[in-house]
Image: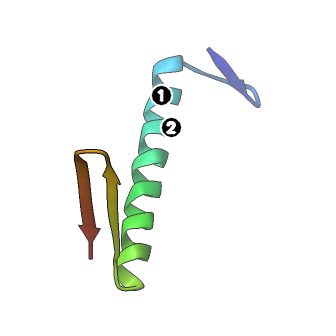
């Protein structure tokens, strides 16, 4: 139970609030990357190749 002012908020509600905040941050970052034209990542480690691109 967390205290905010005079109100007690259960831990589960705090978890849901933080989950929504994290999802909103991911969505905003995706919109920002999309607005600026996308990004690409090419990574080679030995025989492992990772190519990721987003638009």
**Residue carrying label 2:** 18
Q: Which one is in front, 32 or 50?
A: 50
Q: Secondary structure at mark 2?
A: helix
- Rounded to the nearest whole Å, what is the CA distance between mark 2 and mark 1? 5 Å
Q: Is residue 22 left or right of residue 3?
A: left
Report the quarter where the C terminus lies: bottom left
**Residue carrying label 1:** 15
Q: Residue at x 37, y 73 (%)?
A: 31
Q: Secondary structure at mark 1?
A: helix
Residues at badges 2 and 1 in contact (C-beta under 8 Å)?
yes
Q: Residue at x 27, y 70 (%)?
A: 54
Q: Is residue 2 left or right of residue 51?
A: right
Report the quarter where the N terminus lies: top right
The extreme right residue here reads: 5
Q: Residue at x 30, y 45 (%)?
A: 46
Give residue 3's position: percent from left, percent from top. Answer: 71, 23
Q: Residue at x 53, y 28 (%)?
A: 14
């Amino acid at each position: 139970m967390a205290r905010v002012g005079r109100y007690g908020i259960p831990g589960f509600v705090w978890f849901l609030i933080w989950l929504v905040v994290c999802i909103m941050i991911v969505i905003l970052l995706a919109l920002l990357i999309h607005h600026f034209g996308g990004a690409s990542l090419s990574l080679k480690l030995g025989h492992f190749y990772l190519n990721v691109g987003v638009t």
